[in-house]
Image: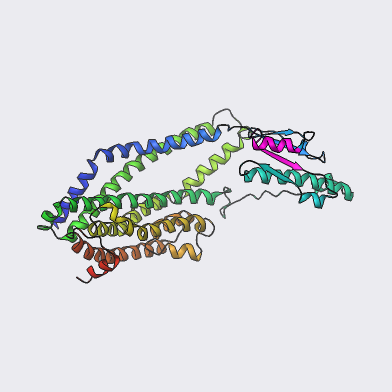
Amino acid sequence: MSVLKLIIKREFIAKVRNKSFIVMTFLSPLIFVFIGVLVGYLSTLKGDQKIIAIHDQTGLFAKEFKTDRQYKFLDLSSTDVNVLKDSIATEHYHGLLLIPKSPDNKTLEKSIEFISASSADVMFIESAEQTIANKITQDNYAKAGIDQSAIENAASKVDIHLRKASGEETLKGLNWIKMGIGGAFGYLIMMFIVIYGNLVMRSVIEEKTNRIVEIIISSVKPFQLMMGKIIGTSLAGILQFAIWAIIGLGMLFIATAFLGAEVAAPGVAQAAQPESSGVLQLALKEIGELPIFTLSISFVIYFIGGYFLYSSFYAAIGAAVDNETDTQQFMMPIIMPLVLAVYVGVFTVIEDPHGTVSTIFSFIPLTSPVVMLMRIPFGVPIWEQLLSFAILVFTFVFTVWFAAKIYRVGILMYGKKPTYKELFKWLKY
């Protein structure tokens, strides 16, 4: 056990003293904040306004299109169509909306064309279709003698207010908030399993390439060396997560205090507060009621379990090859379950967090670290979390035994690129 402790200590110190580790530990939160601010700023920038020429032979639709910051509409119905088409080819106009005369509205619906030099924006086409359809519908009402204003007055718009069983008002789109929080934790686990797993693999390859491992193996068992690398690197990862959590909670506390002060500014009547402030306040309240503590503990537990599971694969791969290039043939089976877990979480958990698919994948050990974390904000029974983690631990123990056999043989193998068939043979040694 003392030997294992020495290896763990060696790996941990080597990681935390690395300059890149220190820099990224304190720089990463600032990078994420900078990226968020940059994306928000870029989203407010106005793009180049695109000019759309309209040739409306009916004289009914051109005035329905209103110029905005993205599109400028020009009514060029008096200009020859061929001239306008030539202007499209020379990119004088972004596109030409051609509305021909038709004997009836049914024919007109199928006769309208949009001509452009490049692929048309789907959002613009849908908007144009809706604008023309609304005008045609109005014309159909008029021809049928139907009072459109009466139809509009008779139309109803229902706004359902959401409340909990306790009577408290809740927020529309709360599931998206829960999915965002759970998805962020799940994505972090996936990302750092890959990052720290690769660190373990590279460390093994480096020692194997430098022949240092031959000296180490003379006094340390291969299994101890593998476990020491996995545990030492995981402790460095946990330390990094803890620092990020402290920084993140500090930023969240400052943001909440600032926004709270803005919302509850003295001398401002409740009725005069912007609606967005009320929604923001309710959103912060809902976030505060989420099982953040459970989610945080589960994050650490599933990170450790998922990391141990996948790192044993990474260590086995590192021992089996001589350089990083040879690892590519073995990486796909490892990465695919993690990618599958993210897709299941994004496309299934948000729609039905307690459904069959979500539940099954939260128990499968290769996907549970990601999927279960995405489910927890929606309220997962403790017994399901414990069962899922128990399965993960059992699988990890089996995987370590499995990977140790490959590690034991592969760590001293040089000069030959292994195949899956040879790896299977190593399991019998």
Image quadrant in which the C terminus is located: bottom left
Q: Locate residue 150 relative to residue 84 in the image: left or right.
A: right
Residue at 9 percent of width and 57 percent of height: 219
Comparing 371 with 114, the one in front is 114
Q: Is residue 153 visible?
A: no
Image quadrant in which the N terminus is located: bottom left
Q: Locate residue 151 relative to residue 280 in the image: left or right.
A: right
Q: Is residue 209 visible?
A: yes
- As drawn, the residue found furthest toward the right would be 145
Q: Is residue 96 magenta?
A: yes
Comparing 422 with 367, the one in front is 422
Residue 97 sits in which quadrant? top right
Q: Position of residue 162 (x, y in %)?
A: 61, 51
Comparing 412 with 196, the one in front is 412
Compared with 84, 289 (above or below) is below
Q: What span is colored magenta in the figure?
A: 81-99
Q: Locate residue 369 relative to residue 290 in the image: left or right.
A: left
Q: Position of residue 298 (x, y in %)?
A: 37, 54
Q: Position of residue 167 (x, y in %)?
A: 58, 51
Q: Is residue 61 magenta?
A: no
Compared with 47, 368 (above or below) is below
Q: How is the image coloured?
A: rainbow
Residue at 20 percent of width and 49 percent of height: 11
Residue at 74 percent of width and 38 percent of height: 82
- As drawn, the residue found furthest toward the top would be 267
Q: Position of residue 154 (x, y in %)?
A: 80, 49
Residue at 77 percent of width and 43 percent of height: 99
